[in-house]
Structure formats: C-alpha cells, structure tokens
Image (cartoon, rainbow, N blue to C red):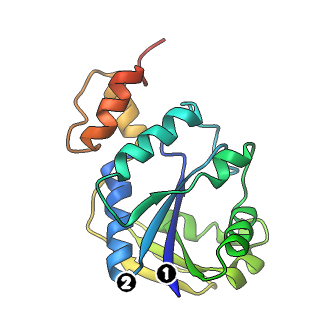
C-alpha cells in the first residue's frame, strides 16, 4: 500500500520551512510521497491574501525539484472553505490503495478537539505532529511525533520581508522568488 503524507496550507508564499517539514516527515516515516494541498479558503484563518492561482503556481515551483513531492488541487478546485474531513473523505474514496498521513504543526495539535468531525477524521487517517521547541505535543488523540531541525521561518515573515524590500533568498526556493517577481506579488498596491 502506498504511503502518502498530506501537507495543507495557504502557502502564501510557500517557503523552505514547508519543504523541510515535508522531507523530514517523508524520511522519518518512510512515506512514498508528500502531497501539498493549497487551500482555497482555510476554515481557521483569514482568507489568503494572494489569489489561489498564484499560490498554486508558487507551490508547483517549490516542489518541482523533489520527485516525492506533488501538488494536490482538491481544495482549490472545490473552492470555498474546505474542512479537513471533506478533503480526507474525498481522497480516501478516490485513492483506496493509499495510506494517508495528515501532517500538522505542533501548534495545531492542541486545537484538534475543535476540528470539525475530528473523531471521524481519526478513523480515516493518521496524524503526524511536527515537533517545535516552544510547543508540547500533548493530546488525547494518537499522534505520530516527528522531530525536525529548528528553522524559524513563516509565510507572514516572508511577506513582511518582501514588503520591507529585504531579501528572502535561502528562506524561499529560488523558483518561488522567480514567481513572486514575475507576478509582482506582495508589492505595495
């Protein structure tokens, strides 16, 4: 049975921290692939600032150098708010021979009880919690823990650096920097 990790997010923009998490979890759990799932509109955050078309383009550029990384457009194609339970149900139905692992940050673990239909979600998929220094992975749910090297980068930090005219080299893949420049993303309007 194929083993696939799912890494969702707004990816506004995707950065090397996302790629590091994906690769570390893939190696630690012996996963065949990691599917990056850009959200159209996440239920727990404000809407992304950048149109999904550009975020998809950036994610595709970010993952193209890793043969184990793919982009899954299930949530973008569905449009509107996507809850994890809807996405996972659809993936499990479409890919019956795949064992899925849902990758979440340690900061999300404590919010799991608030997720829509969380108990049903745990029956369909395994959760992987990526450990961060400032968060403890304490949960009543069975979470597979994976330690990753500390790399403090976030999409909001990248947007702020771009807004201030600072370099994002080594924080974001060069292919993503090219997309940002080409489409004039994150510039002051």
Give the residue displayed 28% in from the left and 54% down from the top.
Answer: 65
Asked if residue 133 shows in the view, the reply is no
- Residue at the spot of label 2: 30
**In the image as oriented, which residue stretches furthest toward the top?**
189
Q: Give left or right: position of 42 versus 19.
A: right
Relative to 55, residue 1 above or below: below
Quadrant in the rendering for residue 115:
bottom right
Residue 130 in the image: x percent, y percent?
A: 42, 71
The residue sitting at 34% across, 51% down in the picture is: 64
Cα distance, mark 2 to mark 1? 8 Å
Q: Residues within 10 Å of mark 1 (few under 14, many from 20)?
A: some
The residue carrying pointer 2 sits among few (fewer than 14), some (14 to 19) or many (20 or more) residues within 10 Å by Cα, namely few
Picture coordinates of residue 62 (x, y %)? 35, 47
User: Which sits in the foreground, 135 or 21?
Assistant: 21
Q: Position of residue 157 (x, y in %)?
A: 37, 39
> Which type of secondary structure does the marked residue at label 2 adopt?
loop
Q: Which mark is residue 3?
A: 1
Helix, strand or loop for disc 1: strand
Name the residue: 65% across, 54% down.
74
Question: Is there any visible trace of residue 115 in the rendered image?
Answer: yes
Position of 46 compared to 17: left or right? right
Q: Horizontal placement of 170 versus 10: left or right?
A: left
Residue 2 or residue 144, whichever sits in front: 2
Which mark sits nearer the N-terminus, 2 or 1?
1
């Amino acid at each position: 049975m194929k083993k696939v990790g799912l890494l969702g997010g707004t990816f506004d923009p995707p950065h090397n921290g996302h790629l590091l998490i994906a690769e570390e979890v893939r190696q630690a759990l012996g996963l065949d692939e990691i599917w990056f799932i850009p959200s159209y509109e996440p239920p727990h955050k404000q809407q992304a600032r950048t149109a999904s078309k550009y975020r998809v383009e950036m994610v595709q550029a970010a993952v193209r150098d890793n043969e184990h990384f793919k982009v899954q457009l299930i949530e973008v194609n569905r449009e509107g708010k996507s809850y994890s339970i809807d996405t996972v149900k659809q993936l499990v139905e479409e890919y019956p021979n795949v064992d899925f692992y849902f990758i979440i940050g340690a900061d999300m673990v404590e919010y799991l009880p608030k997720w829509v239909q969380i108990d049903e979600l745990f029956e369909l998929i395994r959760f992987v919690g990526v450990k961060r220094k400032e968060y403890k992975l304490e949960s009543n749910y069975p979470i597979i823990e994976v330690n990753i090297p500390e790399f403090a980068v976030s999409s909001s930090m990248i947007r702020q650096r771009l807004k201030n005219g600072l370099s994002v080299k080594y924080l974001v893949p060069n292919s993503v920097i090219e997309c940002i420049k080409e489409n004039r993303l994150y510039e002051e309007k």
